[in-house]
Amino acid sequence: MRNILPLTIITIIYFCSCTRNQDKSSFTLLPTDSKIVFTVPKDCKNTTSCLQYYAEPDGNAFLCYLNRDKNKILFYNMNTLELSFEIEMPQKGPNVVGRISSFVIHNFDTIMLTTGQMNVLYLIDSSGVIKNKYPADNIMNGAYNIYYCNSPSTHRNLIIKNGTIYVGMHLLTFPDPEEIQLFKICLRINMKNNEQQLLPLAYPPIGSIDKKPVYNYFSTHLIDNKFIYNFISSHDLYISKNLENFRKVPVKSKFMKKDFLLPDLRSGYHSVIKSNLEHGTYGMFLNDSYRNVFYRFAYPGVKMNSSIMSLNIPELINLNEFRSVFSIMILDSNLEIIGEQLLPENTYNKNMAFVNENGLYISTNHPKNPEFNPDSLKFELFKLGRIKNKDY
């Protein structure tokens, strides 16, 4: 009898394990025929790196879009697909904010702007009224003064919660994995009195396999009271509950074959861009709260031939901005990989995507897409689909 019980337990564990493996599913993103199209004003480009989907408490939703050339934020109504209103901030006169580089909409009374000044945050409302300014204190982060850098697409680093702004601290240098841990990664700002404090959380040891410096840009996301840090040159995500220490979660794309590389920035624009294109990085990180998953964009390196060295600067910028290939990783609520989808070449825009109750929308505004139209802003709907018995 004593021998039967352990054998029974082992048998139960074995069959439970087999059942779990058989039930295990992975996920993919399925393109649909559903598309939405917005008309772009004559004075506006149809691509941007600053885009945000915002839904009001009453359910009214907007796609918010930065027209950087005209210093405007455009608000498209998601029901009518029409331009509902716009905010234009003057670049001359008494209420000047400078050229807008990014925005974050908390609500229509709380819209945060970063500008080319990089040392002031502006708080405005949906009428464009400047309600407050938050100049950076004379705080040193290592050997450098703090500054503000934000992009909703890849470097989202402004989070507003309970009257507090949490600002991700980007660096003006690229330290090696040991040196970078001397720098703090988060600044806390009291919105009432502009009291500022660098929090204890320091950079993790971001670097290449041989411990050399890499691009250390990142985005910050506050989800369920956890700060998630997504570095473009790290296979890991870093999570912090207290902004004092990290927990590391490995989230590596299966399409990433090369190590990260920081090129010699003195080698000339052509060489730098060629290196950037040939070595992979990560990009957007989106929370799909409707389906309880996350999406992490990944850019595998693409071999470039020598003809790139003869391109002019605008052509190089286009190559760098509109990557030919990228994948989207699907993560569950524990940040475990449950799928990854490689998108068709030269079809989608890596910087323009958003999530709503329908699914994941990705822009088809890629210059090499045969359907590219400079007068419109197009998005294609992807649905989350399940693949049975596929191991990840």
Image (cartoon, rainbow, N blue to C red):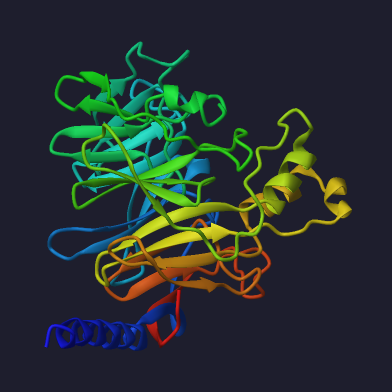
**Percent coordinates x, y for residue 259 in the rendering:** 64, 49
Taking the spot 44% from the left edge, 60% from the top edge, the residue there is 296
**Which residue is nearer to you in this view: 53 or 392?**
392
Q: Is residue 153 visible?
A: no
Taking the spot 19% from the left edge, 82% from the top edge, the residue there is 9
- Asked if residue 123 is positioned above or below residue 23 in the image, the reply reads above
- Asked if residue 202 is positioned above or below residue 292 in the image, the reply reads above
Q: Is residue 272 visible?
A: yes
- Asked if residue 250 is positioned above or below residue 182 in the image, the reply reads below
Which quadrant of the figure has residue 368?
A: bottom right
- How many marks are shown on the rendered structure? 0
Taking the spot 53% from the left edge, 62% from the top edge, the residue there is 253
**Percent coordinates x, y for residue 229 in the rendering:** 37, 44
Where, quadrant-wise, is the C terminus in this rendering? bottom left
**Which residue is nearer to you in this view: 365 or 344?**
344
Query: Would residue 319 appear left or right of 193 to someone viewing this image?
Result: right
**Percent coordinates x, y for residue 388 in the rendering:** 40, 88
Where, quadrant-wise, is the N terminus in this rendering? bottom left
**Which residue is nearer to you in this view: 365 or 319?**
319
Query: Would residue 89 appear left or right of 349 to someone viewing this image?
Result: left
